[in-house]
Amino acid sequence: MIGKGIAGAWMVVVLMVFPVLAVSMEPMAVVKAPIDAVIAILNDPRYRVADTRLVQRDEIWKSVKPMFDFEEISRRAVARNWRKFADAEKVAFTDVFSRFLGNTYIDKIQGEYHNEQIVYLGQNFHSDVYAEVRTTIVRETVEIPVNYRMRRGADGQWKVYDVIVEGVSLVKNYRTQFASILRKEKPAQLIERLNKKLAEQNRQLAEDG
């Protein structure tokens, strides 16, 4: 009990003296801050005016992009095929895949958000470098579990490498698709496919305003 009291006192000191470090070391804080920012952007009356959808989209992307480890997401999405990618192809794939994911999921958020509440259920540490943040999206009478699997990098920062929605892994979903393509095509062709899809997305977004 005494140890707990001392630990609590030291935690207050640490939070006061090193607030940025404290946030960077907590997986839940890494997830919660950008999600809160996104909700604020979605509720911002400035974006209810016509022709502000793309501006809102850019603000959402700026908020959420830093919380994701897109290189790790990309590597896991192609799994063992990653070694077939040349260094330049790894960079190109990570770049286009991250932007494709951003477009896909921000479009979904903009289209389906209706003042849902995000409940933060807790964080589990699986090791010194792996953790999972558990949340639930509360939508009227429906609750949707969304978990964020995270990895701590060499710089000590926690970042998301997979999102599990109702038990379905984002990474595994794309891994299945990419494995099918890479059985027949080379990495450069997969990158070309994604670039075409990204171009189509961007054209549609420009038309929708």
Image (cartoon, rainbow, N blue to C red):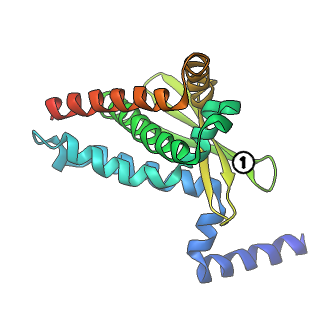
Q: In screen coordinates, is 126 left or right of 103?
A: right
Query: Above or below — where is 141 with respect to 119?
Result: above
Q: Position of residue 102 (x, y in %)?
A: 40, 39
Query: Of the residues shown, which amino acid type is indicated by label 1?
Result: Ala
Q: Position of residue 143 (x, y in %)?
A: 53, 26
Q: Which residue occupies the extreme left position in the image?
A: 50
Q: Position of residue 208 (x, y in %)?
A: 16, 30
Residue at x 52% of width, y 52% of height: 67
Instruction: Determine if residue 114 is in view.
Output: no
104 or 175, which is in the foreground?
175
165 or 177, which is in the foreground?
177
Task: Name the quarter where the C terminus is drawn.
Answer: top left
Give the SS element for disc 1.
strand
The residue at which mark 1 appears reads as 131
Residue at x 25% of width, y 46% of height: 56
Residue at x 59% of width, y 66% of height: 23
